[in-house]
Image (cartoon, rainbow, N blue to C red):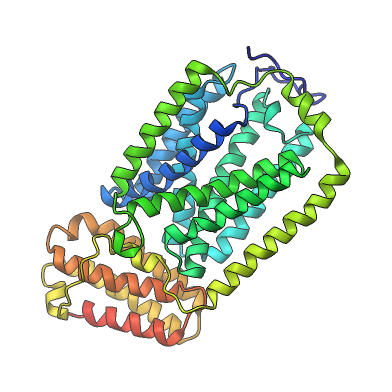
Amino acid sequence: MSTTTTIPPAPGTRTRALLNKVPEVTIWFWIIKILCTTVGESFADWIAVDLGVGLINTTIIFTVVLAAVLTWQIRLPRYNPFSYWLAVVVLSVTGTLYTDILTDKYGVNLAITTPIVAVLLAVVFGLWYRKEGTLSIHSIVTVPREMFYWLAILLTFALGTAAGDWTLELTGWTPGVAVLLPTFLIAATVVGWKLGANAVLSFWIAYVLTRPLGANLGDWLAVDKQIGGLGVGTLGTSVIFLSAILATVVFLAIKRPDVIDDETEVREAIARRPERERVMLGYYGAVAAVAIGVLAYANHQPHQAFSAQEEALGGAPVEQLTPQQATAHFPAADVTQLRTITQDTLTLVTSGDQAGATARIGDLETAWDDAQSRLEPLDETAWTFLDSEIDDALSAVRAGTPDPASEQGALGALITSLNG
């Protein structure tokens, strides 16, 4: 039976005491966490892109849903598997969308987004520990601790999304290959925990790493076979994983293998070995160095960023069109807007302002995505052709090590097509 945990609220805290609001960390916890992160990637893509809702509108919708779900979750007096995992699913989708807004709409480079989100997460942990004296999930027994917990969860999803996308950008790996790196790092974290690393630190490291693991699994299932996937599609992937989440949550609600008892925090405190924990910090540092070395090596090999291939779902060759054919059926106002943004980006590249070019081309992606629902029905062949050329331009400007000649070539080709 679930009872109040052994760590009380921090001295001087005026808040109601709750039964522990989170599940025990068992194998079921990690299974369902990975399922949730996969849904975060595929479901967000399906709504924003496949349904044509758009990135901003999808983000607004899920922000409202998140507020409602968290209000329900926080008002409950004890852990409830349905409300808890619903909150995790919605946070997964929302964290993905927030990161996508920074990179896609505002053109913030993933090399900047990733450390910024990491710093924000570190600040939340610092404030949480300073106020409550613990970061253990076995002590979520007050409303302030639960609010810190959910804010940290949101940032772990955003960080995992940014780091995972940056990995694909740096390496050009397909999702099926990219899944190996977080799998290795999670395995190394488990080994570190078994050897005496701090349990709370190990938990949060693994929690962040399951985000790119789940996202890569989702992409691997969703994208076409010709670009390294299984061709299930974003809708099919979302249905599969949402069904698996629901089945697992029903099992947890019935069997209750994940309810924390009042001995968990005591066992956690007794198991701590500070000297061993300090040694294992060096181990984690060595694992991080290995991961950085692998990424650096892959980045220096000839490759194309996976994002440049991702839009080619379906695998069919893109039919080449003349400029007149490419724009004949599209409204002049849309074509002019796209051409203006592309020309601005080319001017910035030519002048050596790479940061400005990266920011400006984000407007191109946003304008193109927003116009998809209107333009694609007018001429699907022309839309696919321009979509491919826009993808080439985005890939060239956002490359880990941009090549001005490649950028100018891709942007120039796009301007030529838009001049029809």
User: Residue shown at 56%/66% (left/top)?
Assistant: 111
Snapshot quadrant of residue 15: top right
User: Residue shown at 29%/43% (left/top)?
Assistant: 236
Q: 92 or 233: which is nearer to us?
A: 233
User: Residue shown at 52%/57% (left/top)?
Assistant: 180
On-image quarter of the C terminus = bottom left
Q: Is residue 154 left or right of residue 129?
A: left
When the figure is inspected, residue 341 is found, relative to residue 409, above or below; the finding is: above
On the image, the x and y values in percent for residue 127 come to 73, 41
Q: Is residue 365 left or right of residue 291?
A: left
On the image, the x and y values in percent for residue 71 come to 51, 26
On-image quarter of the N terminus = top right
Q: Is residue 382 visible?
A: yes
When the figure is inspected, residue 394 is found, relative to residue 285, above or below; the finding is: below
On the image, the x and y values in percent for residue 354 come to 50, 78
When the figure is inspected, residue 171 is found, relative to residue 205, above or below; the finding is: below
Q: Is residue 330 visible?
A: no
When the figure is inspected, residue 420 is found, relative to residue 210, above or below; the finding is: below
Snapshot quadrant of residue 137: top right
Q: 379 or 401: which is nearer to us?
A: 401
Q: Is residue 133 left or right of residue 111?
A: right
- Count of labels in the image: 0
User: Residue shown at 76%/23% (left/top)?
Assistant: 9
Q: 211 or 54: which is nearer to us?
A: 211
Q: Is residue 132 left or right of residue 38?
A: right
The furthest residue to the right = 275
On the image, the x and y values in percent for residue 138 come to 69, 28
Snapshot quadrant of residue 128: top right
